[in-house]
Image: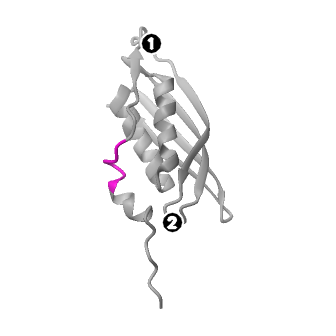
Amino acid sequence: MARRKKSDYEGRQEYVRTMSLPTIEVWENKYPDKDYRIHLDILEFSCICPKTGLPDYAVFEVDYIPDKWCIELKSFKLYLTAYRNIGIFHEHVVNRIVEDIIKACDPRYLKVKGIFNVRGGIKTTVEREYKRG
């Protein structure tokens, strides 16, 4: 039986938690005493399949309840665009985005849902929810 060779992208998965990405900037929330939800639809997300090197496309939904800080959208767009050149598994994308949003703005609540286009007859949806303390 022939051994399968790892793709260059697949071998980079061990660095997924520490790889350098653009900073998600924030701005001060003037209503930190109120619970309100912010919903973001990201309709043009792309990254690279770590197995084939081909592009993967997805729609993302981000819901969060801010505390002291809100996500600055231009920097968030630049952050998401950086994934276009990264070979990364769908599950890792969602987890990394959640961790980076928490690091940037420490929301009270966060849900990130990645809905990836059909590839090989399989549609993948990955969702992670976070509730502070």
> Magenta stretch containing residue 72, yes or no?
no
Query: What residue is disc 2 on?
Result: 51
Return the x and y of residue 52 as percentages of the image width and height: 55, 65
Q: Nearer the viewer, residue 65 or 91?
A: 91
Give the residue type that dot 1 points to. Answer: Lys
Give the residue type that dot 2 points to. Answer: Lys
Query: What residue is disc 1 on?
Result: 34
Look at 41% across and 37% down and name the residue there: 130
User: Could you tell me if residue 93 is visible in this image?
Assistant: yes
Return the x and y of residue 70 as percentages of the image width and height: 43, 20
Quarter occupied by residue 122: bottom right
Return the x and y of residue 31 as percentages of the image width and height: 43, 9
Extent of the magenta region: 15-20
Look at 47% across and 91% down and name the residue there: 1
> What is the count of numbered marks?
2
Look at 60% across and 32% down and name the residue there: 41
Give the structural element (helix, strand or loop) at label 1: loop
- Furthest residue toward bottom: 1
Q: Nearer the viewer, residue 123 or 52?
A: 52
Q: Is residue 12 above or below residue 18?
A: below
Numbered circle sitting on residue 130: none
Q: Earlier in the sequence, mark 2 or mark 1?
A: 1
The mark lying in front, picked from 2 and 1, is 2
